[in-house]
Image: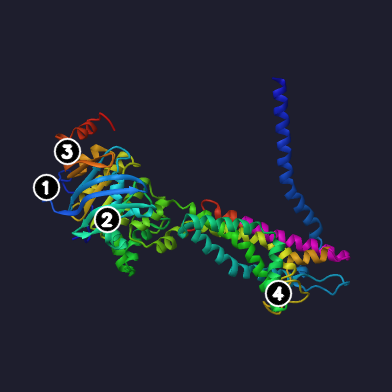
Amino acid sequence: MNDRLEIEVPADINRKRTAPFVPKIEVERLNFYYGPTQVLHDVSLRVPEKQVTALIGPSGCGKSTFLRTLNRMYETVPKSRAEGNIRLDGEDLLQMDVTALRRRVGMVFQRSNPFPKSIFDNVAFGPRLSGNTGKAALQDTVERSLRRAAIWDEVKDQLHNSAYALSGGQQQRLCIARALAVDPEVLLLDEPCSALDPIATAKIEELLFTLRPQCTVVIVTHNMQQAARVAEYTGFFLLGRLVEFGRTEALFKAPEKKETEDYITGRFG
Amino acid sequence: MIRRKIVNAAMFALTGLCALLAVSVLFFILGYLIYHGGKSLSWSFLTHLPRPTGETGGGMANAIVGTGELLALTCLIGVPVGFMAGVYVSEFGGKTAAAAIRYAADLLNGVPSIVVGIFAYAVLVVPMRRFSALAGAASLSVLVIPITLRATEQFLRDVPNTLREGALALGAPKWRTVLTVVIPAAMRGIITGTILAIARVAGETAPLLFTSFNNSYWSRGLDQPTSSLPVMVFTYAISPYEDLHRQAWAAGLVLLTLMLVANVAVRAILSPGSAPRT
């Protein structure tokens, strides 16, 4: 389906789909520790397949840590440990081979982090890891990924220039293209727009809409409007606990918990 | 008020004078070398072998080649060890091991070079029963290893963690992350540090005196005594002949020129805008 995905934006871009809820990732009673400090308490959450899930909450509430359990990036921190159950398509995520897991669950970071290589080599990094080194196939994958990340037209004439020559917003979309190049089933985004201006932010939000039919997206954001714009489902974290999770409209219009209401009405946080 | 101004002016003058002194030492040495060495520096000095003692003329071609040989061997022996150890300390060693190795490297860096020379003499020259370029390069390698190690470690540490995370998040194993992302990102710095380390030991004399020793002719092999510029400077400078003194100055000039070229090259590599396309 993803052959030659042109970047023409569908007319109903701003209308969210009402797809059935099929859980892609199931988290059950997750407790997470950095050394002696417990950062997540008893978090249970189901991430729906091929939809966008937003995680909101004040700084330090554990939403980024939670995101990092879904591809086990926390393992780079010594003495961190996760207890509980996380299943990806029913498989135990915490027991999987970590490199295989990360090829299925991609991640885009808060600060864009292109490698000091050419644009082409950045995108080709993932496919090369899986041993796809054929030149024609690589070129195809790179173009397709850059198109999916809505940056192809801006970089197609400078594929072999350094990625550092791009603007901040372009670098972030390049990082998304790099993550998409291995066709991940899930894409995790950790405040991907926090360092970008409104125009670059809008481009990335548009991009999330076009990704949705192909990929499950989980996005951590500080920006509640962003969550409301892009996500079908939203979870609200506070002090390491998941306070509330539900359809975005419901959560913003009629929150069940008082903490959620206080946060989204700006009474704190 | 006035007192403060006077103290201020005095401190300004004193520190400025010391700064001037520090800089002028370089130009003084350089001028002195050019004045004394320039007179003896000629094409035949660069291309001829030394004449028998007492005759005037001759050159140091064998010492120039010998120094090149010693440094090339040092690059082959010492640089890889220092580089790999630096990668280990920065990327793979746990906190304790890294700290221990770093401390040991600093201690090794502080070992006087003449002690390194005696050591190489005892463990290489004596069992081999002769002085050799290999023994000389081994002692220079001991000096190069800690510098290369620390430079490598430092520049790898400067690579932002977000790059490592980026590669790991794509499912790259650790070794591959280090090899294809982290090391290339630090490569310019590492090369620079290595060039400076080599330039720094190029002028070492003490460890060579009793390892590679000296040779009035072309060295017949890596396991044979080999002439080098610093040792020639030493030998000629303490000889009683005026002509040899002039040649010692010339050799010093050649050595210093090599180091200055290395330093300038490093600047060129590090300057922004000359970034190699990676």
Q: Earlier in the sequence, mark 2 or mark 1?
A: 1
Q: Which mark is residue A258?
A: none
Query: Which chain letter goes with mark 4?
Result: B
Q: Which residue carries the number 4 mark?
A: B125
The verdict on a common chain for dots 4 and 3 is no
Amino acid type of the residue tagged 3 in the rendering: Leu
Q: Quadrant of residue A130?
A: bottom left
Query: Which chain letter goes with mark 1?
Result: A
Q: Quadrant of residue B21?
A: top right
Other residues around mark 3 within 10 Å, as few (<14) / some (14–19) / many (≥20): many
Residue placed furthest toward the front: A36
Other residues around mark 1 within 10 Å, as few (<14) / some (14–19) / many (≥20): few
CA distance for labels 4 and 3 = 81 Å
Q: Which mark is residue A251?
A: 3
Q: Position of residue A58 (x, y in %)?
A: 29, 37
Number of numbered discs visible in the structure rendering: 4
Amino acid type of the residue tagged 1 in the rendering: Thr
In this view, B142 is above or below B32: below
CA distance for labels 2 and 3 = 33 Å
Q: Earlier in the sequence, mark 2 or mark 3?
A: 2
Q: Is residue A129 left or right of residue B266?
A: left
